[in-house]
Amino acid sequence: EIQLVESGGGLVQPGGSLRLSCVASGVNIMRQHMTWVRQAPGKGLEWVSGIDAVDGSTVYADSVKGRFTISRDNAENTLYLHMNSLKPEDTAMYYCRNGLMLGPFSLQGKGTQVTVSS
């Protein structure tokens, strides 16, 4: 079965850190452009970060630049999002998907909830 499964979300205090994981089955993430997106309650989908399939270059939304790091592990076939200095405005459901930014995609996980609150 081809699927993406996110995990690692939770409740964290402002300034804290989390690492999100996206385990891929049936698809090699090294051959896919991979992206993290998020959706806060009552708001639209927001692109967060992406990693290029060809050269592994990474890009970030201005809202997370310098605080979040996207990475991937070939052996584990897993995409990560390391999140530091978390802010209440980072509270959202986080999804991993293939494709670039908010463009076309064929795979997306069910998401993992991140809540930043004191």
Image (cartoon, rainbow, N blue to C red):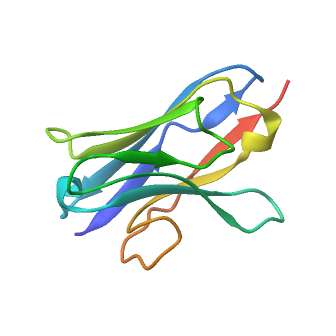
From the viewer's perspective, is 76 left or right of 8? Answer: left
Q: Position of residue 100 (x, y in %)?
A: 42, 66
Residue pictured at 43% horizontal, 57% vertical? 35
Residue pictured at 31% horizontal, 55% vertical? 52
Nearest to the observer: residue 15 or residue 66: 66
Quadrant of res 43: bottom right
Q: Position of residue 9 (x, y in %)?
A: 57, 38
Nearest to the observer: residue 109 or residue 82: 82
Q: Is residue 9 above or below residue 14?
A: below
Quadrant of res 109: bottom left
Residue pictured at 60% horizontal, 29% vertical? 67
From the viewer's perspective, is 98 left or right of 15? Answer: left
Q: Position of residue 11 (x, y in %)?
A: 70, 31
Q: Is residue 114 above or below residue 82?
A: below
Q: State the count of labels.
A: 0
Residue pictured at 19% horizontal, 53% vertical? 30
Q: Position of residue 90 (x, y in %)?
A: 72, 41
Nearest to the observer: residue 113 or residue 42: 42
User: Looking at the rendering, in which quadrant would you find the N terminus?
Assistant: bottom left
User: Looking at the rendering, in which quadrant would you find the C terminus?
Assistant: top right
Q: Is residue 52 above or below residue 65?
A: below
Q: Is residue 114 above or below residue 87?
A: below
From the viewer's perspective, is 61 left or right of 41? Answer: left
Q: Residue furthest left?
A: 75
